[in-house]
Amino acid sequence: MKSTNRTPVIAANWKMHKTIEEAVCFVKGLIPLILNVPVKVYVAPPYTALHSSAVAARNSPVVIGGQNMNDENEGAFTGEISANMLKDAGAEFVILGHSERRHLFNETNDFIRRKVKKALSKKLQPLLCIGETKQEREEEKTEQILKQQLEESLGDISPEEMETIILAYEPVWAIGTGSPALPKEVQVIHHFCRQLVRQKWGADTAEKVIIQYGGSVHPQDVKELMELPDVDGVLVGGASLTLDLFNQIIHYSR
Ligand code: 13P
C-alpha cells in the first residue's frame, strides 16, 4: 500500500472521438460502475459533446472537462473556446499543454502559462501535461525539458493554486504506441517532478499535488503504475474510448 493522502485521479482524454450520442451513452454507463471507487474519475469529451456529457454526469461522481481552451475571455479567435464557455457547458477541469497541442499546433509554454492563469482565475481546474519527445529523451534532455515546461507553463502561481493543479507526465514517445514507459522510469520522473514542485512551492504543496502518468495506459499495466509512490493517477487516451477497458483501468486494484 502507498502511504499518501492523495486521492488518485483517473482521467479519460477522448481527443477527437465520439459523437454526442456515444459520449452520453458512455457517461451513463460509467456512473453505476464507479459509485464506490477510491479514485476520482474525470472525462474530457470533444467540445460538441461537452454539455450533453455534463448533463448526463450531473449529481454523479463523473467529472467532465475540456481538452483545451484559449487564454482570452472572448473575441475574434475563430475556432477557439474560452474558459467561460467551457464552464457554461459544464466543464470543471481543462487539459492544458497536451503534447498534441504542443507539437501539432505549436503551442508554447508561454501560451500555456497564460491559459493556466486564466483557468485558475475562472475556477476551472487545470490538468497540465508535460513530457519529452523521443529525440529529447535520446539526447538525455528529459529532466531539462520537464523542468522548463513546468516552470514556464506554471509561472508564478501561488502554492494554494498549485495544489489545485493536476500534473500529467506524458512522454511523447509513449503516447499511442501501445508501450507505456517502464514503471521504474516513471517513478524516477514523477519523483523528479515532485521535487521541482517542492523546490518552488514548498513541501506541503508537493505532498498534495496530483501527478498522473499518461501514454499507452492499458488495463494490464495500470496496477503496477498506480502502485508507484509518486504516481497519483493516469491519463488515458485510446483505452478510455471503450467503457469496458476504462472500467478495468478504474478498478485496477481488483
Ligand atoms: P494513449 O493512452 O492513447 O497513449 O494517449 C495518451 C494521451 O495522450 C492522453 O492524454
Image (tube, grey):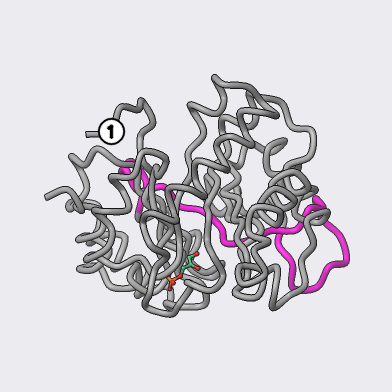
For this view, does 100 lie left or right of residue 39?
right
Is 80 contained in the magenta span? yes
Query: What amino acid type should be assigned to the residue bearing mark 1?
Result: Lys
- Residue 216: where, in percent of width, then height? 39, 70
The span shown in magenta is: 57-81
- Residue 200 placement: quadrant: top right
Secondary structure beneath dot 1 equals loop
Q: Is residue 154 above or below residue 11?
A: above
Residue found at x 30% / y 27%:
3
The overriding secondary structure of the stretch rendered in magenta is: loop
- Residue 201: where, in percent of width, then height? 67, 26
For this view, does 215 lie left or right of residue 134?
left
- Residue 84: where, in percent of width, then height? 69, 48
Is 4 contained in the magenta span? no
Q: Which residue is mark 1?
A: 2
- Residue 230 placement: quadrant: top left
Bin the neighbour count of mark 1 within 10 Å (Cα to Cα): few under 14, some 14-19, many 20 and up: few
Looking at the image, which is closer to me, 145 or 66? 145
- Work out which quarter of the rendered image holds the N terminus and state it: top left
Residue found at x 54% / y 65%:
171
Residue found at x 58% / y 39%:
165
